[in-house]
Image (cartoon, rainbow, N blue to C red):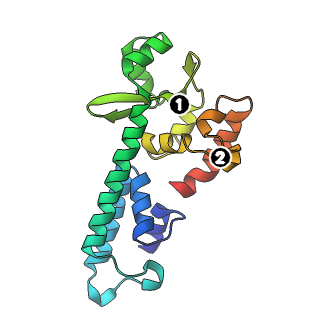
Amino acid sequence: MTRALREIVGTQKLNADGIAVAIANGDPSTLEDLRKLLDCALATGRDSELDESLWEKEPTEADLAGAHADADRARETALRRTVSDALTREEVASRLGISPQAVSKRAHGDQLVALRYGGRWWYPRWQFADDDVVPEIQQLVGLFPSTLSLTTWVTTPFADLDGLTPAEMLRRRGGRQQVLSLAQATSAEAW
């Protein structure tokens, strides 16, 4: 069980905070995997307590409920922040000079990043360069467990990119390869 949790949590410390971070950054399948593992660990009863040197103290029902609530709030905050600077399907169609149906088709083919929120599809602005889409979209989508985790990552400044965000670096000469290298190097550990 510890090995399975380590794979899900990555480099985060195996405690309630580390699990909360994994939950906040994970996709629904990650959340479900973590919940199953925690339920299994807690169901073992007092006879086989968790190793406190690894876990610290055993999480209580309140700790777990708090971690779930924190993760839900973090996900909602990230979604709202992303949607506040996103385009609608119609705006993307107009920007790219294609039909709204073609926009949907591109999103389903991982040629556009789209998030569902409030009953609508939203297209984060970072993925657009001039009158087209950043060509590395498909490669980046394949490295992250969800479009929200990708959008969060691509809009976060990195020292490895001279303090720029991957979105900013994608628009610079030679920056695309740096972004792909950074994504490949960090995605396995981070997600």
Identify which residue is drawn at 47% across, 63% down. 9
Secondary structure category for the residue under label 1? helix
At horizontal 45% and vertical 66% (from top left) the residue drawn is 18
Q: Based on the displayed image, in which of its 4 quarters is residue 105 positioned?
A: top left
Q: Position of residue 85 (x, y in %)?
A: 44, 30
Above/below status of 105 relative to 117 = above
Local crowd size for mark 1, using a 10 Å CA cut-off: few (<14), some (14–19), many (≥20)? many
Q: CA distance from mark 2 to mark 1?
A: 17 Å
* Crowd tier of the residue under label 2, counting other residues whose Cα lies within 10 Å: few below 14, some 14–19, many 20 or above: some
Residue situated in front as seen by the camera: 175 or 39: 175
Residue 38 is left or right of residue 142, and the answer is left
Quarter assignment of residue 116: top left
Left or right of 31, for residue 119: left
Q: Residue furthest right?
A: 174
Write the residue at 61% across / 40% down. Answer: 165
Of the residues under marks 2 and 1, which one precedes in the sequence? 1
- Residue at numbered disc 1: 126
Type of amino acid at the residue the image marks with label 2: Leu
Residue 124: x %, y % from top left: 46, 31
For label 2, the SS is helix
Instruction: Pick whichever, 175 or 29, lies toward us.
Output: 175
> Is label 2 or label 1 in front?
1
Residue 182: image location, x then y, percent = 65, 46
Q: Label 1 sits on what residue type?
A: Trp
Dividing the image into 4 quarters, which one contains the N terminus? bottom left
Query: Which residue position holds label 2?
Result: 182
Q: Is residue 20 above or below residue 73?
A: below
Residue sitting nearer the eye, 84 or 179: 84
Expressed as whole percent of the image width and height from the top left, the position of residue 140 reads 55, 38
Residue at 62 percent across and 34 percent down: it is: 168
Is residue 58 among what the camera can see? yes
